[in-house]
Amino acid sequence: MAEPVRVGFVGAGRLASRVHYPSLDEVEDAALTAIAELDAERLAAAADRYDVAGRYTDYRRMLEREELDAVYVVLPPHLLHDVVVDCLQAGVHVFVEKPPGVSTYETEAFAWYAQQHGCLTMCGFNRRFVPLLRHCKALVEAAGPIHLAAVRFHKFEAGPQDYGFYRGAVSHLTSDIIHAVDALRWLAGGEVTEAAAHSRALGRPYANAHAALIGFSSGCSGVLLASRRAGARRHTFEFHGGDVSVYCDDTHEARVYRQDCGEPQVIRAADLTDAAHTHHRAGFLAEHQHFIDCIRSGAQPLTNFADAAKTMRLVDQIAADVR
Ligand SMILES: NC(=O)c1ccc[n+]([C@@H]2O[C@H](COP(=O)([O-])OP(=O)(O)OC[C@H]3O[C@@H](n4cnc5c(N)ncnc54)[C@H](O)[C@@H]3O)[C@@H](O)[C@H]2O)c1
């Protein structure tokens, strides 16, 4: 077997510890070689748990001293810039979480550096890798192209304790609702041809409710509904094509209707994956496998930085007119 892909990691915070380290640990042809983390306790905890010899508080030293093929940079978006550009200039392939920067401009800059230095890149839009969603999308597409897709992503958010996310570094739309925006692009296929949005600031000094209608060159119409003044977290998807309809949530269960033939087929995440583990059910393991497979084959990952910039641009279109 070929040598494993040598991976370095910047950040051992909450999300990385919960889903990224466990995922990478399960990808057979990847070897976690080094970790850079500012916080000594988090660094030791992650490195001890996964038996990693390379331990750094300064990621630049990690880049100088270690022979790495790829680096995962899992930091809040406003801390990404120098780390991502330094990694790309060092010629390593780079994975970041969403959002892929604080602005479209920054994401496009990351894509430009990646191209200059021949790097493969990936943004962690994990919805595209959720086993339940992938299965249902393929099932509808086998019957016909998706002509209508709607994604809802609601949450109850008390507050305001902070202005948007990370004390105002990015908006709710850019940091979180972006999952739904990217999922719409993925379900619809093609390029955005038109977008009409109604965004409002409800009882907060920033936009927290969005309704958008988006046209795609594939012929699909997309609908986004997202409120942060909702009664509870609800993240749901519906998509239609070839006289088949899917209604599902993000990680548990789908109902599939075919040509009005009575009761729906119920598909559960547990039928498709080890649903007891969040990183399996929510697509993190599959996104890591995709990144490592792409590094092996030299193909750009589906959610590379140039593609992620398109999602950021659509976010800008939706946020353009806040009432
Ligand atoms: N895909 C999802 O569903 C999802 C869910 C939650 C969070 N996220 C994203 O994950 C990212 C990380 O969020 P989090 O809540 O885990 O953050 P976090 O603050 O818990 O972790 C960041 C870690 O990075 C370390 N750090 C900061 N600067 C560093 C540097 N220069 N070098 C080395 N280490 C450094 C910090 O000490 C901290 O431990 C964010 O972009 C967030 O949007 C995605």
Image: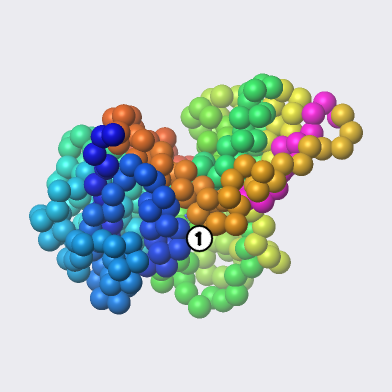
Identify the residue shown where x is 52% and y is 69%. 205
In magenta segment, residue 256: yes
Q: Nearer the viewer, residue 39 or 316?
A: 39
Q: Judging from the image, what secondary structure is the residue with disc 1 in?
A: helix
Quadrant assignment for ligand 1: bottom left
Determine whether 286 is above or below 226 in the image: above
Residue 152 appears in the picture as rendered: no
Start-end of magenta stretch: 246-260
* Amino acid tagged 1: His
The extreme left residue here reads 64
Residue 137 appears in the picture as rendered: yes
| Residue located beneath label 1 in the image | 172
Identify the residue shown where x is 53% and y is 37%. 185
Residue 74: percent from the left, percent from the top?
34, 58
Identify the residue shown where x is 45% and y is 63%. 18
Q: Is residue 145 left or right of residue 318?
A: right
> What sort of colour scheme is used for the picture?
rainbow
- Provide the major secondary structure of the magenta segment: strand
Residue 19: percent from the left, percent from the top?
45, 58
**Which quadrant of the rendered structure holds the N terminus?**
top left
**Which quadrant of the rendered structure holds the C terminus?**
bottom right
In magenta segment, residue 82: no
Identify the residue shown where x is 37% and y is 44%. 28
Which quarter of the picture shows residue 134? top right
Residue 94: percent from the left, percent from the top?
28, 46
The extreme right residue here reads 262
Q: Nearer the viewer, residue 180 or 275?
A: 275
